[in-house]
Image: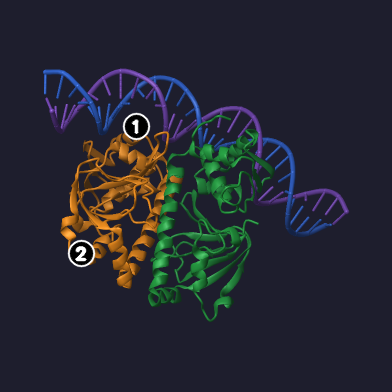
Chain colours: A orange, B green, C blue, D purple
Amino acid sequence: MYADAAVHQISAPLPATAEKIRYSDRDQRVSAFAKQEMLFCEGDKADNIYEVVDGVVSTYRILCDGRRQVFEFSYPGDLVGLGNLDAYPVNCEAVTPSRIRRIPKNSFLKSIKERPELGRKMLEIAMSELSAMQNHFVLLGRKTALEKIASFLLDFARRNVEPDARSATLDLPMTRSDIADYLGLTVETVSRNLTKLKLRGVIDLPQSANVVIRDMFELEDLAEGDEDTV
Amino acid sequence: MYADAAVHQISAPLPATAEKIRYSDRDQRVSAFAKQEMLFCEGDKADNIYEVVDGVVSTYRILCDGRRQVFEFSYPGDLVGLGNLDAYPVNCEAVTPSRIRRIPKNSFLKSIKERPELGRKMLEIAMSELSAMQNHFVLLGRKTALEKIASFLLDFARRNVEPDARSATLDLPMTRSDIADYLGLTVETVSRNLTKLKLRGVIDLPQSANVVIRDMFELEDLAEGDEDTV
DNA sequence: CGTGAGGTTGATCGCTTTCAACGGAGGTGG
DNA sequence: CCACCTCCGTTGAAAGCGATCAACCTCACG
């Protein structure tokens, strides 16, 4: 459902790239992670890069007093753990039971060195990652709680349904706490604003993990703060 | 002062790279921009990349209702306008009078294609950019106003003074409004918290653009929210 | 059936925003 | 050269949004 790689091109142009990376021992390196199991921790030696084969993982950092910021959710085809530091600067854990391919950083770098076009592809990916992050800066810095929730649902919907759909059914793999820490809110505020959207008739919430977007366009308006005409 | 390229290695490993890019018409492409003059606007055709030779520029986006989010300040040696989109997704304007080198995107891409090691260098830069952005996510999503201000001053100080200095004098090139929009605050809140830091004796404010950090370590504590022991 | 984690809702608090007034610095024109 | 004006920054008062604290609900699981 949410992990449907087939409809996952928009914000994750990685599959094509990842597919080009062929290792002799490629499939032995895929292993399973339970929900909430760590792929790696902040400070661990950054020897590997990970490709999400199936499931969802989150990347986050925790401040000394417990505050947490989730940086991104990664979906099948996405790579995590990339970076030029010796140690991972972030934590990474499975949000759902996942299958993850471990790619030794050395061989990854070697591949890039051997095939410049691969490096350019990676650069392209990094760039589009950068521009995707700009949207999130706007969200964190300038949007209200309601706008954040609307934007989040919309982003999630866009990777799972055809672009011009007017409605959508989503199965959110992450908890309210994950969402809150991704949007810079508390769980209570996330919950309250989901309820608010439901009362306004923009979405439906058959179950807590199941969101039905009734009107995509209205949600888009709310996400941009265009108005409050509901 | 703030534009001292010599002490500008930490967050901008670009000079070395930029220096490797030699064009026959290299110096003809440097032009001057007045304060607040736009280098390019959101939606403009992204034909050029710009290197800050001297001065400071800001990159930002504005929502339809006027809310603004500044993504970054770029300093001498930094490149702006990179990206794989046809149109710039952001606005870019000079914060101070600046000298800017325009680099046609074509020739830039050609250079990368011709010299793979340049592409790898760029990838490295993009990566470290990504990890720098993570710090800003934490700041925007989880830090209080005081922590944001402290973090901002600290970041700015780190690019202008030797790493182990206990105090520092800064000349902030940007306005309170720029700072506010960078930190996701209002000008009033920025002003109030600078005053608060001053009253606590952590900083001094001889003039509004001039900040003296009296105790770097204390500022670091405040930036991380370690405590409020002042 | 009991238990515990995740989710929702209510009441209250407090930080940041908003609205408003004022002060100072720089620039322009009389 | 000075008066004026405008922009930027600061400060005060009040409002509002999201956080906090707390209770309760729901559901999966042992």
Q: Position of residue B160 (x, y in %)?
A: 60, 53
Q: Residue furthest bottom?
A: B24
Determine whether B57 is above or below B183 in the image: below
Determine whether B140 is above or below A80 in the image: above
* Residue identified by numbered label 1: A188
Q: Position of residue A199 (x, y in %)?
A: 29, 35
Sequence-earlier tag: 1 or 2:
2
> Does residue B48 appear anywhere in the picture?
yes
Residue type at mark 2?
Tyr
Tell me if label 1 and label 2 are in contact, CB under 8 Å: no
Q: Please state which of the two labelled residues, at mark 1 or mark 2, is closer to the viewer.
A: 2
Q: Say left or right for C12 vs A194.
A: right
| Between A186 and B55, the one nearer to me in the picture | B55
Q: In which quadrant will I find the C terminus of chain A?
A: top left
Determine whether A64 is above or below B41 in the image: above
Dot 2: within a 10 Å radius of its alpha carbon, few (fewer than 14), some, or many (20 or more) residues? few
Q: Say left or right for C17 vs A189.
A: right
| Between A181 and A112, the one nearer to me in the picture | A112
Identify the residue shown where x is 32% and y is 53%. Answer: A81
Answer with the quarter of the image where residue B76 lies: bottom right
Answer with the quarter of the image where residue B52 lies: bottom right
Identify the residue shown where x is 22% and y is 64%. Answer: A19
Label at residue A23 = 2
Identify the residue shown where x is 34% and y is 42%. Answer: A149
> Does residue A229 appear anywhere in the picture?
no
Q: Say left or right for B18 vs A62.
A: right
Label at residue A3 = none
Kindly identify which chain the residue marked by label 2 belongs to.
A
Secondary element at image label 2: loop
Kindly identify which chain the residue marked by label 1 belongs to.
A
Residue type at mark 1?
Glu
Identify the residue shown where x is 34% and y is 68%. Answer: A119
